[in-house]
Image: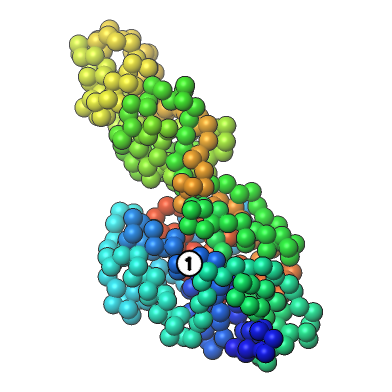
């Protein structure tokens, strides 16, 4: 790292964004002997790690594979994920003597809390000589003509970055600024603007892993179910997820809904199987002589209030033995394929991730470098690679950060 009298700091690698991907990239690059500075406008390090998993940080998923990611360029993530696996990050925790637990579906949580993950990453950066500058606003990024950089580095500086903490010149510039989700902790479109400045396209952006809402008049019948959750299969197109669905005052949430929200398209219906694993047609056939009312019968399988509201909406209030076989079959089909059309999502303020981003067709899948802007890299959520719920997005942050850190 070189400091000039004119308050220009020359550095091998300048990283904008001190989150999961940025810190991983910084530590990896510095361990290779690069001089590295990380800038972030936030006053605290890695806020998204801090609040993740209810403060316990679901830091990876043992089942990670490319199919767990959504992108217009679906094969892009393969290379990086293959070169930095969940086992690599687990080894890092072991090195720092941190403990973790496996929950359902391969999710790993840090027993020592998310603060321990942040400290681990900072310790790795500190040990390698990374300089972290927080509360630093970026004013301008300019490409430098060949030979103009004042750097005495191995590679001449390609970028000049004016900030509230002085001017920096760098051979490699890494954008790790994240997406639009959770603006209250500092999310902004900064990374997309940098991409556009260098002629790199952005794919369509929308909130992902987010609760879904419905028009109040359409949802009125179900609003009283707020707080009730059921095991269900939620489907949209070829995607389906079996996890819990939570009823809210405004619509639906819970893991299955968050999962499908990344794939759902506005104006289209969702398909929900409220009784997965049951053949409701056969169950009803066995009840042809029953004098039970449908809601009383369904309370054996569904929460009481849900059974009551469901039957008030879709079934006549008469004993099962008075239903025709056709009517019972129709009711069974309705339970297995409840079709509802959300009016929208709760937006970026409640979204865990941003779907879409920097078009990965303009980047190298090996290095994360822009194809037409030498020395410019993008890592983490700012890219059009979105993981499913359950630690997959952190694994992409580690993998993409590591891939760039290996070459910057």
Q: Tell me where residue 380 sits by quadrant.
A: bottom right
Q: Is residue 308 above or below residue 246?
A: above
Q: Nearer the viewer, residue 390 or 276?
A: 390
Identify the image quadrant of the N terminus.
bottom right
One can see residue 242 in this view:
no
Please provide percent x and percent y for residue 245.
36, 38
Locate residue 144 relative to residue 82 in the image: left or right.
Answer: right
Give the crowd class for mark 1: few <14, some 14-19, many >=20 residues within 10 Å. few
Q: Nearer the viewer, residue 319 or 94?
A: 94
How many numbered callouts?
1
Residue 382's x, y, as percent? 58, 60
Pick the quarter of the image with the C terminus.
bottom right
Secondary structure type for disc 1: loop
Image coloring type: rainbow
> Which quadrant would residue 95 be assigned to in this image?
bottom left
> Mark 1 = which residue?
43
- Residue 133 x, y percent position in the rendering: 52, 75
Give left or right: position of 309 versus 251.
left
Res 92 seen here? yes
Residue at screen point 46% across, 80% down: 125
| Foreground of the two, 213 or 93 | 213
Establish if 182 lies above or below 245: below
Query: Percent x, y for residue 253?
Result: 40, 40
Image point 56% across, 79% down: which residue? 37
Q: Nearer the viewer, residue 333 or 95?
A: 95
Q: Residue at x 74, y 74 (%)?
A: 143
Residue 299 located left or right of residue 60: left
């Amino acid at each position: 790292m070189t400091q000039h009298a004119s308050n220009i700091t020359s550095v091998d690698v300048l990283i904008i964004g001190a989150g999961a991907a940025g810190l991983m990239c910084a530590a990896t690059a510095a361990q290779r002997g690069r001089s590295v500075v990380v800038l972030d406008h936030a006053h605290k390090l890695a806020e998204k790690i801090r609040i993740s998993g209810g403060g316990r940080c679901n830091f990876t998923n043992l089942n990670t594979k490319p199919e767990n990611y959504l992108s217009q360029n679906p094969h892009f993530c393969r290379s990086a994920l293959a070169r930095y696996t969940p086992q690599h990050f687990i080894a890092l925790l072991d090195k720092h003597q941190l403990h973790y637990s496996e929950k359902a579906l391969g999710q790993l949580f840090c027993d020592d809390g998310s603060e321990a993950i942040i400290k681990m990453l900072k310790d790795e950066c500190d040990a390698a000589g990374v300089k972290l500058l927080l509360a630093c606003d970026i004013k301008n990024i300019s490409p430098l003509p060949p030979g103009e950089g004042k750097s005495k580095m191995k590679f001449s500086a390609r970028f000049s970055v004016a900030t509230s903490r002085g001017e920096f010149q760098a051979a490699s510039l890494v954008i790790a600024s994240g997406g639009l989700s959770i603006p209250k902790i500092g999310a902004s479109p900064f990374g997309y603007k940098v991409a556009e400045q260098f002629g790199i396209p952005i794919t369509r952006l929308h909130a992902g892993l987010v609760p879904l809402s419905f028009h109040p008049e359409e949802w009125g019948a179900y609003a009283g179910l707020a707080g009730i959750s059921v095991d269900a299969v939620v489907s949209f197109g070829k995607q389906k997820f079996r996890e819990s669905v939570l009823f809210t005052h405004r619509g639906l949430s819970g893991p299955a809904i968050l999962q499908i929200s990344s794939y759902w398209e506005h104006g289209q219906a969702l398909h929900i199987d409220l009784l997965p694993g049951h053949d409701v047609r056969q169950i009803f056939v066995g009840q042809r002589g029953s004098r039970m009312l449908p809601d009383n019968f369904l309370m054996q399988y569904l929460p009481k209030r849900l059974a009551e509201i469901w039957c008030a909406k879709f079934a006549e209030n008469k004993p099962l033995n008075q239903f025709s076989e056709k009517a019972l079959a129709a009711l069974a089909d309705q339970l297995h394929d409840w079709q509802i059309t959300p009016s929208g999502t709760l937006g970026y303020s409640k979204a865990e991730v941003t779907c879409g981003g920097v078009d990965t067709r303009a980047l190298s899948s090996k290095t994360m470098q822009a194809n037409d802007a030498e020395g410019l890299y993008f890592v983490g959520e700012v890219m059009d690679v979105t993981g499913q719920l359950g630690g997959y997005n952190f694994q992409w942050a580690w993998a993409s950060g590591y891939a760039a850190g290996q070459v910057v």
